[in-house]
Image (cartoon, grey):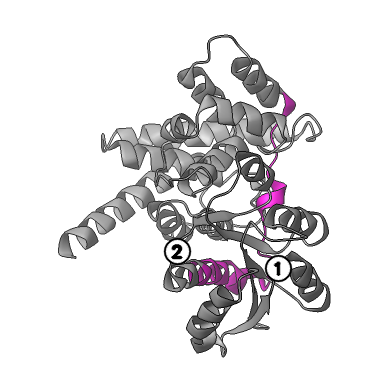
Amino acid sequence: MSRKVSVLFVDDEPNILRAVRRHVRHYKDEWHIHFAYGGVDAVKVITRENVDIIVTDMRMPEVDGSQLLEWISENHPEIIRIVLSGEAKLEEIYRIVGRSHRFLAKPSSPEATISVIRDVVDAQLHDQIENGVFEMSMLDKLGTPASIFNALQGVLDAEEVSIDEITNIVQQDPSLSLRSLQICNSAYFKQASQTCDIRKAISTIGADRLRELLKAGRLGQDSRVQVEDDNVQQEAYWLARASKNECATQTDSQNVLSAAYVLGLGLRCGAVDTTGTLSQVAKRAAFLTVLFGLPEILPRSFLSLAKSNASAPFEHWPKLIASAVIEQNNQLSNEEAAA
């Protein structure tokens, strides 16, 4: 690494920051660590320091968490944004979806928070080895073609809303799919639910919340996305279905089939630079899944895929994806059995 990671912890309660300070002192050789007593102080720190990751509370005086995240999104989109908060109003949650990468619910131990930061940093290093770049944020690059966006809006505005119809539309688009999985796997709406299954994620979030998030512009961009993105979306949809079908010839595990589908989408997601070899793209996609707190089978499968035939033509990717996800599912099962 060319420099140490810089982490900023923000809370308006001195006791909480003191507790965090005690636990993170062991990482002072690995990280530059900063503390801010509230949103106003955080803005000052970010203005004068290079900050890679921020961990912030929501309810703070003067500048609250949602205002801070909106300011960071507009002025420093490269910063990883992790929310660590207790009770928050629904309208506050709507404001930070699309402005934050992860939501951790209080009470959360300092060890758990540190573990999340370590996972994010370690995952980024896999890509950094290849390209020497320390760009950590992909959140603001998610976008959805107008045709998909408008179709989803029409289904959500219907008198009778069907979860299956919503799922059929969402799973065609990598950005909507990954955003839905991100929301479901974090504690934005009380309880996080670990899943790779897009339908389960949609069902967990609920149609009413999806409708409000869509209206608030928190599910990605709409018709302003460039027309050429339609081709990327169609390519991702084909790869996801082909990977799932390839897996289905070898297993009937819903978890494996769902993971294979998401891997296909992830390799052609707008938030992931698709230039370079399969190995490079897979490492970037692995980082995105760690950043969003998605199930372990996804980043492990991406990294396994990164070690496969890097020069394989695109039409061979489904077989490689199927092999990677089945292998990692077996390894995870063996590890759980041995634990």
Secondary structure character of the magenta stretch overall: helix
Disc 2 residue type (three-letter): Ser
Q: Residue at x 59, y 60 (%)?
A: 82
Residue 12 x, y percent position in the rendering: 65, 69
Q: Is residue 174 above or below residue 83?
A: above
Q: Is residue 302 above or below residue 249?
A: below
Asked whether the viewer can see residue 278, the reply is no
Residue 35 x, y percent position in the rendering: 66, 78
Q: Can you identify the residue that label 1 sits on?
A: 38
Q: Is residue 66 above or below residue 165?
A: below
Disc 1 residue type (three-letter): Gly
Residue 85 lies in the magenta stretch: no
Number of marks in the rendered image: 2
Depth check: 241 or 175 in front? 175
Q: Is residue 24 left or right of residue 9?
A: left
* Sequence-earlier tag: 2 or 1: 1
The circle on residue 67 is none
The C terminus sits in image quarter: bottom left
Q: Can you identify the residue that label 2 sits on?
A: 108
Q: Residue at x 68, y 44 (%)?
A: 142
Q: How far separated are the C-alphas under marks 2 and 1?
A: 19 Å
Residue 44 x, y percent position in the rendering: 81, 73
Q: Which residues are magenta?
A: 117-146
Residue 305 appears in which quarter of the rendering? bottom left
Residue 109 x, y percent position in the rendering: 43, 69
Q: Is residue 107 left or right of residue 62?
A: left
